[in-house]
Amino acid sequence: MSEVVTYNRDGSVGVITVNYPPVNALGHAVRSGLLAALNQGLADAEAKVLLLVCEGRTFIAGADIREFGKPIQEPVLPEVMNQFENSSKPVIAAIHGTALGGGLETALGCHYRVALGSAKVGLPEVKLGLLPGAGGTQRLPRLTGARKALEMITTGDFVAAPQALELGIVDAVEAGDDIREVGLAYARKAVEEGWPVRRVRDLTDKVEADKGSEVFDEFRAALEKKARGLFSPFKCVDAVEAAFTLPFDEGLQRERALFSECMASPQRAGLIHAFFAEREVSKVKGLAKDTPVRDVNSVGIIGAGTMGGGIAMNFANVGIPVTLVEVKQEALDKGLGIIRKNYENSAKKGRISQQQVEERMALITGSLTYDDFKDADMVIEAVFENMAIKKEIFAKLDAVCKPGAILASNTSTLDIDEIASATARPQDVVGMHFFSPANVMKLLENVRGSQTSDEVKATVMAVAKKIKKVGVLVGNCYGFVGNRMLHKRGAEAMALVNEGATPQQVDKVLTDLGYPMGQFAMSDLAGIDVGYRIRQERRNSGEDVPLSWLDKLAEQDRLGQKTMAGVYRYEEGSRKPIPDPAVDAIIEEFRKEQGITPRQITDQEILERCMFVMINEGAKILEEGIADRSLDIDIVWIYGYGFPAYRGGPMFWADQIGLDTILNAVEKYYDELGGDQWQPSALLKKLVADGRSFGDL
Ligand code: T1G
């Protein structure tokens, strides 16, 4: 008997206990242990009913994702499920924490399910590029009907226990937090009342009710929009539909075949890489696990503009009071007004209650004086990109903030060390780069200065988790990780249009790759004036920043979505970018001024120049230690810049393509175009020479 699954008896109840931290995943040892324990329970004459319960913080949270891609070891999960379902004794699953994926499928293979009120259930396989492969697509719809099963399986969203009871997924929800006691009490009732074996596979009423339903095609149509570029969501629909068109065992086989297709898809590898990378980024290299973290129970924010307002909402959302400071009452009122409007919109969509709107607004206090920061644990500066203004602000913060307060800048490009030099406490200065809209975007790029203390680094990473962001700690350089690579992509996109491509051609290559929007549509969203001001700032500081046709748009007040015209034009009430011949004319005129004769440019060249220049820059960022691991870069791009998670992030994607292919192209463009951006990274060359990948680092 493996030690991760044990069997013992409590009166007439045979108890099968899984104890395989951290989340009782169905690794090989657990699968074989479950079968062995089941057989022991079946052989135990005293045991009338069997109870499956887990130790630790959760019921089984799925198959062991770490085993994917490796040779499969018997018994496979579907076999374990069938044995449980065909047990001659009733089997009860007692659920606490999260019963997910293979975990919920295991419970559905049992005959009865009891859950704690705090439990959740779900089939999130689609988030890993898969589908439920152990009977979930055949058993769940027999309990919930087609529509709810499709919703749960194509979204992967979790369902809370009370709702799971309404849907018939669980049979009882009990209060308390001792799942073993709750499970035993429920099992004893089954013994006393002589409950029969009740197999989910035998339930047919929901199947009959939805036979021939249009719901499957309805979901396929909806997924065309919602799951653009994704593979497995459509396979999920095919699998669930089989439950309504095939006998149970044939449905299981159909599910298995579709599961294998998903397993073979490169998207599975990308999404699983993203799953683990998201968890690894919180473990910062060189930062001891027990590094002290400071309390952050009150926050100050400077600037009630788009970023400041969004940042404030993140803290109010988790109950942390915020003091929002502006220079003028008018700007403050406008900022607070926008925050309330955002909350009201969420309430209208039923995401929060009106009471929560009021509670969160009550946590945000407007002010016109820095004095109100004197007790703040952390202050975040969110004013526009100007070094002189930021240094002035940090000097003032240094004067009013208490010792130990963390002084953070939301700068998206500027030098954290130079900002810190305006204070006498550079060890307490750090970058906290949020992404617009800051109350929505999941990424928080935390930037360590050369003197930022470990305590401050550990604290901003803990704050990221607290405000439900994915925090990545990176080094200090111009544009840090995300914007530094984005600027390279942007410059290539601009050059490609100068040389003959159209903005919409470039954007289509990027959206076909899986980005939600292209380079130029993104400029229109962020505001053409933002980039224009940064370029002017750099020109004013004496840097040679080439003229661009985007400057012409800014000077003609084509600032993007906010002026209904930028690189594209926009119609009232729509964010759909519409190509505008007026812009083609501006670009044509610019080419003439620059003496450029446009040429035909292929989509492949656009893809290579926009993406390989980023990867080359990413390699330089790793060389310089600005990012510790390539997965840090992948997570920055997935959660900050919309890089498709199913490709695993730009560095993982590069490994999939092959670094030799990337290097060959980089060297070709270096020869043809020149420029630092195409100077091949030494690390890239070394990895190719050693036959290694970014993932091997
Ligand atoms: N396999 C292996 N490791 C896992 C795991 C899993 N299924 N789930 C979590 N971990 C590790 C994770 O990497 C981390 O490790 C630690 O557990 C804590 O996780 C046949 C094919 C359960 C809600 O998709 O959603 O079943 O970093 O930091 O925030 O149909 O983890 O500490 O070393 O996320 O409290 C389906 C995935 C699998 C669920 C807990 N199941 N997990 O969240 O902790 S496919 C899933 C989660 C499947 C079958 C198919 C969450 C969680 P480390 P954590 P958390």
Image: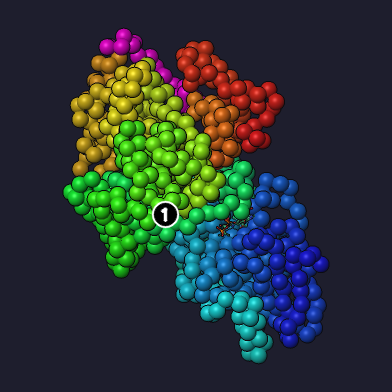
Kind of residue at disc 1: Asp
Residue located 26% across and 35% down the image: 560
Towards the viewer: 690 or 213: 690
The N terminus sits in image quarter: bottom right
Residue located 47% across and 53% down the image: 463
Q: Hey, which residue is sitting farthest bottom in the picture?
A: 192
Q: Left or right of 542: which side holds 512?
A: right
Report which quarter residue 680 is drawn in: top right
Q: What stretch is highlighted in magenta?
A: 592-612
Q: Left or right of 194: which side holds 396?
A: left
Report which quarter residue 133 is drawn in: bottom right
Main SS of the magenta segment? helix
Q: Left or right of 197: which side holds 9?
A: right
What x and y, as percent, mark residue 143? 53, 71
Q: Decide: few, some or many residues near mark 1? Use Cα within 10 Å; few <14, some 14-19, many ≥20.
A: many
Residue located 32% across and 61% down the image: 363
Queried whether the magenta region covers residue 620, the answer comes back as: no
What x and y, as percent, mark residue 454? 55, 45
Vertical order, 84 against 277 (above or below): below
Vertical order, 599 against 356 (above or below): above
- Answer whether residue 298 is visible to the viewer in this image: yes
- Answer whether residue 470 is visible to the viewer in this image: no
What x and y, as percent, mark residue 253? 64, 57
What x and y, as percent, mark residue 266? 59, 40
Residue located 63% across and 61% down the image: 23
Q: Left or right of 358: which side holds 276?
A: right
Queried whether the magenta region covers residue 609, the answer comes back as: yes
Ligand 1 falls in which quarter? Answer: bottom right
Please give the residue where the numbered disc 1 appears in the rendered image.
377
The C terminus sits in image quarter: top right
Report which quarter residue 664 is drawn in: top right
